[in-house]
Image (tube, rainbow, N blue to C red):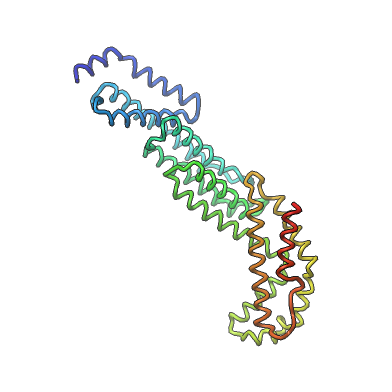
């Protein structure tokens, strides 16, 4: 075997320099060339190791092993440069500046797996994709919470994490499975915050009134005695309820829908999801208000100006008209 290896090395002495030059060209032609070469070499060597006719000391195996080391080195250098660019990027008042990074790098990874039969991914390259690309991306998205954005921060973070989660669900990149789960969780959390914040607007004064009622009960005031509190008397409750006739509530919901439609990104198609979540939260609030009236203002005859059926018809009408 060794004499054969030496003979082949002499005959093909120019092969390794040529391959090194080829790797350099790949890196210059396309930013992800190093990843494509790394995956191709990795798969070829795994295939050789599974063959009884290819010994570890064979000429071809040694040659490809050297090229694999070079490809890994090139890939690591690229990951370091990407990591630095992510760490050094400054928050901008846009919603897609960082999610696009994960999509770009993940798409490249997925694209390079396809031509080679979905073989087992190279551990070092997967680790690099997770720790050096996605980790800085996560940090930058998290920095949005303190950024001075012109739009709602929870909306921007909701859309970014939703975008990442959908992408990772499609691509099924094994090393980013934990990131996919986290992205879904963060997307749900920020959607809940976004919904709760904006739902306070259609019934803001009513919501504020009942928050005060709940606070009094939590402080130890008996439910039947709440109405004797000056700020939460039956008369005050009637005044607040009068501010929200059914027509005004529907108009407020229509304005809310237009506002959400204006600011949500059409690319994510989150409007139906967010609107449904708002409907569910609004129903929950309505039921809570009705329950507090029954418990704290028993026998007063006080009721909301609109019923649950009215509320459902408002949402249905707005959805169908848009």
Q: Is residue 131 visible?
A: no
Number of numbered callouts drawn: 0
Between residue 17 and residue 11, name the one nearer to us.
11
| Coordinates of residue 110 in the picture (x, y in percent) | 47, 36
| Quarter of image, res 304 | bottom right
Q: Residue at x 34, y 19 (%)?
A: 16
Residue at the spot 66% in from the left edge and 87% down from the top edge? 225
Residue 54 seen anywhere in this rendered image of the structure: yes
Q: Is residue 107 left or right of residue 123?
A: right
The quadrant the N terminus occupies is top left
x%, y% of residue 170?
Answer: 51, 43
Q: Name above or below for residue 245 compared with residue 88.
A: below
Q: Nearer the viewer, residue 239 or 290?
A: 290
Q: From the viewer's perspective, tell me whether residue 285 is left or right of residue 62.
A: right
On screen, residue 39 versus residue 242, left or right, reads: left
Image vertical order of residue 86 relative to residue 51, above or below: below
């Amino acid at each position: 075997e060794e004499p054969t290896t030496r003979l082949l090395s002499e005959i093909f002495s120019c092969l390794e320099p040529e391959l090194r030059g080829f790797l350099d060209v790949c890196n210059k032609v396309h930013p992800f060339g190093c990843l494509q070469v790394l995956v191709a070499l990795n798969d070829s060597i795994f295939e050789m190791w599974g063959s009884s006719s290819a010994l570890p000391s064979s000429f071809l195996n040694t040659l490809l092993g050297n090229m694999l080391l070079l490809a890994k080195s090139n890939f690591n250098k690229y990951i370091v440069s990407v990591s630095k660019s992510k760490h050094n990027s400054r928050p901008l008042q846009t919603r897609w500046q960082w999610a696009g990074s994960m999509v770009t790098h993940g798409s490249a990874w997925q694209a390079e797996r396809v031509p080679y039969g979905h073989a087992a991914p190279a551990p070092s390259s997967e680790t690099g994709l997770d720790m050096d690309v996605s980790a800085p991306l996560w940090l930058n998205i998290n920095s949005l919470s303190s950024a001075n954005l012109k739009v709602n921060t929870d909306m921007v973070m909701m859309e970014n994490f939703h975008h990442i989660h959908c992408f990772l669900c499609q691509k099924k990149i094994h090393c980013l499975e934990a990131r996919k789960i986290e992205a879904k969780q963060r997307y749900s959390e920020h959607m809940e915050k976004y919904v709760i914040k904006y739902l306070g607007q259609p019934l803001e004064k009513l919501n504020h009134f009942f928050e005060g009622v709940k606070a009094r009960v939590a402080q130890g005031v008996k439910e039947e005695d709440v109405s004797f509190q000056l700020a939460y008397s039956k008369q005050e409750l009637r005044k607040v309820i009068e501010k929200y006739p059914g027509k005004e509530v529907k108009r407020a919901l229509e304005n809310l829908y237009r506002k959400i439609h204006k600011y949500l990104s059409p690319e994510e198609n989150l409007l139906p999801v967010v609107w449904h979540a708002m409907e569910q939260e609004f129903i929950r609030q309505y039921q809570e208000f009705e329950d507090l009236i029954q418990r704290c203002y028993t026998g007063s005859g006080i009721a909301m100006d609109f019923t649950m059926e009215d509320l459902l018809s408002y949402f249905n009408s707005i959805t169908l008209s848009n």
